[in-house]
Image: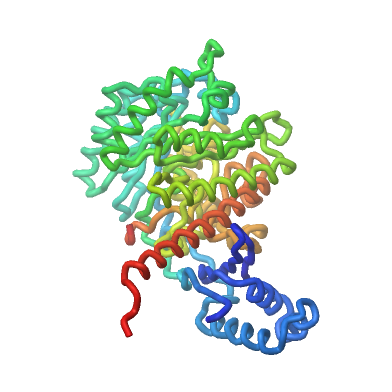
């Protein structure tokens, strides 16, 4: 494509409840703000 | 829904519902905006408003349709997904000490008292809390426990006892505890460092940055700044973990006193810390330290400066990480987690020194938010359900927001404290979060571009 460069392809898909094995975001380094997208998926970590 | 923005002189388009991110030129940014707003009339609108040629418009509209067909543009809204099948709990904030050896002005915990007087958790209560967590964790293998306060090292003996007890539970129940601890650094010594390196998955160390900034608000009970007291210990602890590849964060808070907070990040990076988090203070709007709407321009400039700082330093081998710009577009969490956020009140809870259960550490000590007790085993499933169903799909402001799958609806405690409803996110925090996300995406794109160029250079020129 001439005008558009995709740097991330589609990655959000509804796939049930999730395994829940990942870290709870507030246990990392925030405690007052919520940032979830910086958490890794446990299965991909 | 799309979000089109300019950051670091580059245009980006986020296709919110698919998570796809595109770097585009100005023509594409305008065209995507026009197609989303005007549909079939976009062609006329682009010709009139921007004076683009027929050829240019035809070209860009074809590219847009290609992306749409690939499911990477104008993707329809995702269905609501809840995290966890039946209300399991996987993480616990254990308030082992409602007491503190500092008296920080902005402390949400009222310098450790949490509205209820100073108290230390007994080993019996702590063990009951770990038993409660295991009993409510269902099939989850990884369980998290954060030793929190106040200052948890004021009750270090109990921390050690509870970690040993947790290791025993791991064997008996086939679980894996990840213990973390949040400390102000005052009581850090060699014994703790050795213990932390052996037992703790993560250590969060509170420091606000430059001495003059830190000392203004983080003071000892006699009113003296604590920087000189903690700094050598913080360095020793952090570097010991850094050398071993163990997780830690130096974590600070910025207030209206230091709206030039990028200098505090810079200070910490210059001192050799590689894992840095600096967060905006959350206080009532009238508080002199609180961040206000009129401060946002300056705050945003500071985040812009941080993008430049991170990019240039990392490029020259001076790597460090800024927690709020971390964004793994590829391997990030699943949709269920992105919809439900931190899990406060549902997957996550906090336990007071007396054994009372609350949705998270920020609700502790507020009687109306008490969910139960690890001593009696009572647990308010109705309140848990209310938190569990508080997703980005159920909150009107979040449902319409482009950042919803990245912040996941924000902090429920902030929403409750500032807007009186866990379903109404705190707008000022949202504004800053959105800016940080734009910065994080731009930083990701810049570094990705460099990696691609390096790879191309390494593979050498093509042979004819």
Q: Residue B14: x percent and y percent?
A: 57, 67
Q: Residue furthest left?
A: B171
Residue, x 47% and y 72% (percent of image)? A9
Q: Quadrant of the N terminus of chain B?
A: bottom right
* Residue A11 left/right relative to B137: right
The correct choice, above or below, for A17 with respect to B239 in the image is: below
The image quarter containing residue B183 is: top left
User: What's the coloring here?
Assistant: rainbow
Viewer-closest of B268 and B155: B268
Viewer-closest of B246 and A14: B246
Q: Residue B397: x percent and y percent?
A: 67, 58
Q: Residue B365: x percent and y percent?
A: 54, 30
The number of discs equals: 0
Q: Residue furthest front?
A: B464
The correct choice, above or below, for B285 with respect to B219 in the image is: below
The correct choice, above or below, for B231 with respect to B311 in the image is: above
Q: Quadrant of the C terminus of chain B?
A: bottom left
Viewer-closest of B424 and B372: B424
Q: Residue B434: x percent and y percent?
A: 61, 54
Answer yes or no: is residue B53 visible: yes
């Amino acid at each position: 494509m001439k005008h558009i460069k995709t740097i991330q392809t589609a990655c959000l898909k509804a796939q049930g409840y999730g395994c829940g094995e990942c870290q709870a975001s507030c246990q990392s380094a925030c405690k007052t703000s919520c940032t979830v997208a910086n958490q890794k998926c446990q299965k991909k970590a | 829904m799309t979000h089109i923005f300019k950051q670091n002189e580059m245009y980006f388009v986020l296709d919110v519902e698919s998570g796809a991110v595109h770097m585009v030129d100005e023509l594409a940014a305008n065209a995507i905006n026009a197609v989303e707003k005007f549909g079939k009339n976009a062609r006329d609108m682009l010709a009139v408003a921007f004076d683009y040629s027929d050829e240019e418009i035809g070209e860009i509209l074809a590219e847009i349709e290609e992306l749409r067909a690939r499911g990477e543009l104008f993707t329809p809204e995702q269905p609501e997904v809840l995290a966890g099948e039946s209300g399991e709990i996987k993480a616990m904030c254990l308030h082992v000490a409602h007491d503190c050896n500092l008296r920080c002005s902005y402390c949400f915990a009222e310098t450790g008292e949490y509205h209820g007087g100073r108290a230390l958790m007994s080993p019996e209560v702590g063990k009951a809390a770990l038993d409660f967590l295991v009993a409510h964790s269902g099939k989850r293998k990884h369980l998290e426990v954060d030793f929190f306060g106040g200052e948890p090292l004021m009750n270090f003996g109990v921390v050690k006892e509870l970690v040993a007890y947790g290791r025993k539970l791991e064997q008996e129940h086939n679980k894996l505890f990840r213990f973390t601890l949040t400390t102000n650094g005052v009581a850090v010594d060699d014994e703790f460092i050795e213990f932390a390196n052996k037992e703790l998955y993560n250590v969060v160390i509170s420091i606000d940055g430059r001495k003059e900034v830190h000392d203004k608000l983080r003071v000892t009970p006699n009113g003296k700044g604590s920087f000189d007291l903690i700094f050598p210990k913080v360095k020793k602890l952090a570097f010991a973990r850094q050398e071993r590849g163990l997780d830690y964060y130096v974590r600070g808070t910025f207030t209206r006193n230091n709206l030039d907070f990028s200098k505090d990040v810079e200070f910490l990076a210059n001192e050799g810390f590689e894992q840095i988090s600096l967060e905006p203070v959350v206080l009532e709007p009238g508080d002199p330290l609180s961040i206000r709407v009129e401060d946002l321009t300056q705050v945003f400039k500071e985040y812009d400066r941080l993008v430049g700082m991170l990019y240039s330093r990392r490029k020259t081998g001076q790597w460090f990480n800024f927690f709020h710009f971390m964004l793994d577009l590829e391997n990030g969490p699943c949709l269920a987690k992105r919809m439900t956020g931190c899990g406060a009140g549902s997957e996550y809870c906090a336990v007071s020194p007396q054994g009372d259960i609350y949705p998270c550490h920020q609700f502790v000590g507020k009687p109306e938010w008490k969910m139960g007790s690890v001593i009696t085993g009572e647990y308010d499933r109705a309140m848990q359900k209310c938190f569990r169903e508080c997703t980005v799909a159920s909150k009107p402001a979040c449902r319409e927001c482009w950042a919803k799958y990245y912040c996941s609806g924000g902090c429920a405690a902030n929403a409750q404290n500032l807007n009186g409803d866990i379903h109404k996110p705190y707008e000022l925090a949202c504004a800053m979060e959105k800016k940080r996300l734009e910065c994080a995406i731009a930083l990701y794109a810049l570094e990705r571009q460099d990696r691609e160029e390096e790879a191309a250079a390494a593979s050498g020129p093509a042979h004819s």
